[in-house]
Image (spheres, grey):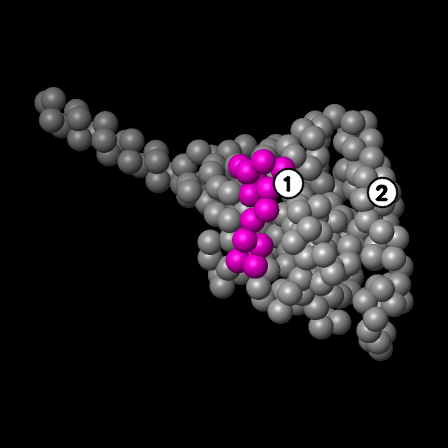
Amino acid sequence: MTLEVIGAGFGRTGTWSTFAALNRLGFPSYHMQEVIINKANKGHLDFWRKVANSPPGAQQDWNRVFANYRATVDNPGCCVWRELMVAYPEAKVLLTLHPRGAEAWYDSTIDTIYFTENVWQFKVLEWLTPFGRKFGDMSRKLVWGRTLKGVMNDRDKAVARYNAYIDEVKAAVPPEKLLVFKVSDGWAPLCNFLGVALPNEPFPNLNDRASIKKIIRNMMIGSYVVLAGVALAVALAIGGLWWWLG
């Protein structure tokens, strides 16, 4: 199996619904959830952290993570779309856009996947757990730093970056190999682009915001558990010290 579709669209541009649609069309797809949820992909987070700490444009052993997939959408794959075009020259490029535009994309991103930067509970996990350190480092350097240029704390600059990025992709990809796509467009443009039949069912409309919020809540609960464990350990250490001194 080889990568045939390179998703260049940012996270929060309908990528979860597109992920489901591609799977339905017979294109097993890679998405951030494959990195952090799929237990079969142990070691993928380490791979992407290495990518994040490598120079932009550096080639990697991409088959290590994409061997079982025909498509990739969302982060972290969208952050290396240029590198993937070199590694998979026959692949087509799918640029997903938020159906309601750049401003809506920004609001959605800040409310969900930017939690690695603006939620203190994740900082606890980053400080005290290997997963937190790896995921935080990868996200900060590859997604928020390299791809989004460190502008997410400034709404106007982030919206400008979103629009400039669209122009960058359009300028770099031959028109016959590029589909600029919104999930509100439905099945037809995607199926025509991939050369497959239209399914006789509605296009997926996944409530990915609710799913991401659930993941964030679970991480927050994990941070409280970690904090409680640290507090207990400190209390026991202090109690033991007092006992020894007494």
Q: Amino acid at mark 1?
A: Gly
Q: Is residue 43 left or right of residue 91?
A: left
Q: Residue at x 58, y 54 (%)?
A: 62
Q: Tell whether label 2 touches label 1 (CB within 8 Å).
A: no
Q: Amino acid at mark 2?
A: Ala
Residue underneath mark 2: 171
Q: Residues within 10 Å of mark 1 (few under 14, many from 20)?
A: few
Q: Is residue 72 above or below residue 196?
A: above
Q: Residues within 10 Å of mark 2 (few under 14, many from 20)?
A: few
Q: Please say whether residue 109 is visible from this viewpoint.
A: yes
Front residue of 64/27: it is 64
Q: Residue at x 54, y 32 (%)?
A: 120
Residue 192: % across, % down: 87, 67
The image quarter containing residue 177 is bottom right
Instruction: Identify the magenta region.
Output: 51-65
| Residue 57, numbered label | 1
Q: Residue at x 85, y 64 (%)?
A: 193
